[in-house]
Amino acid sequence: MNIIIAIIIFSVIILFHELGHFTFAKLNGIQVNEFCLGLGPTLIGVTKGETKYSIKLFPFGGACMMEGEDGESQNERAFNSKSIWARISVVVAGPAFNFLMAWIFALIVVGTVGFDRPVLSGVMEGFPAEEAGLQEGDEIISMNGYRTHFFREVSQYSLFHPGEDTEIVYERDGQRHTVMLSPKLEEESGRELLGLSGRGGRERGTFLETIAGSFYEVRYQISTTIESLRLLVTGKVGVKDLSGPVGIVKTMEDIYDSNQSSGGTALAVLSMVNFSIFLSANLGIMNLLPLPALDGGRLVFLIIEAVRRKKISPEKEGMVHFVGLMALMALMIFVMFNDIRNIL
């Protein structure tokens, strides 16, 4: 049953992404031929007006198929017949809807359990933070110019920037101070640490703090995704460390089971909503990558067209996206088998 819940959540997030494309396509008068959830053969399909709404065999992925999107079409309502800005709005709408959904999920979580303020519970003995005079109750304002709103961001920064000297701005008794810390190796864990310790747990804020905290939560998840991609591109993590739909569903199942056993169904559901913030923000960022077949790849072609003031051949663009799609499918198959191997 938990796997079914995870698949449903994963599918809803994808569906909301495609709903962004669908909504702006309709607003711009573009003909949508099919709006579907999943990939592969059609299980259920119904046609209303000009659009076929369907559910495919494999519940991962989805599509909003527009007239003339990947080829020539004489239809005046075809995607490529519309203005450059109309097409850009349709492409960007998918990731934008993911960020919107992530914020809605964040609003639920932050409104229910609050957030972890970047306030120190203490410092580790013998580490740079103690030597620099930081102490319990200090609030971390920024790290190397990166504004922190949660203690998780303090931990995240140290995790993604190991070994780097870090300028810390902190606040104590209403006054701000600046120190420069150089991480120190902790032999037991093998990690280089600054020696900052957080209070742990979350606390609820005012209405305005809840609204702001929801935006910061989405920013945190976006930052986590971008930093992870940076590590992948720089070779600090490998392709084998990637997780696909199978791995994600398994992770969601584990999170649900763990929280249900420790805090009951309510906590388990809230943990699913919390993980969905990451999923939705992650999907938004991944689709904005400038790769063929992704929204970011289509956006690159549209920007080139806007600069050249001349359309690129739909057939050539369609071929590039087709090749990109095949490459992505190959990567997805590799990641899926990697997920299954890790699970087994």
Image (cartoon, grey):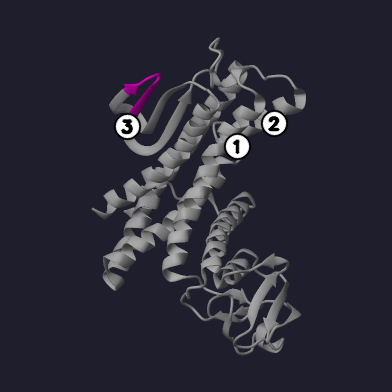
Please indicate whether residue 280 sits to the left or right of residue 288 in the image: left
Q: Secondary structure at mark 3?
A: strand
Q: Secondary structure at mark 1?
A: helix
The CA distance from mark 3 to mark 2 is: 33 Å
Q: Position of residue 211 (x, y in %)?
A: 53, 62
Whichever of labels 1 and 3 marks the residue nearer the N terminus, that label is 3
Amino acid bearing label 2? Ile
Instruction: Give the labeled residue for mark 1.
Output: 296
Q: Position of residue 79 (x, y in %)?
A: 56, 21
- Residue bounds of the magenta highlight: 47-57
Please indicate whether residue 39 sits to the left or right of residue 193 in the image: left
Amino acid bearing label 1? Gly
| Residue lying farthest to the front in this orientation | 207
Amino acid bearing label 3? Ile
Q: Secondary structure at mark 2?
A: helix
Instruction: Give the labeled residue for mark 2.
Output: 303
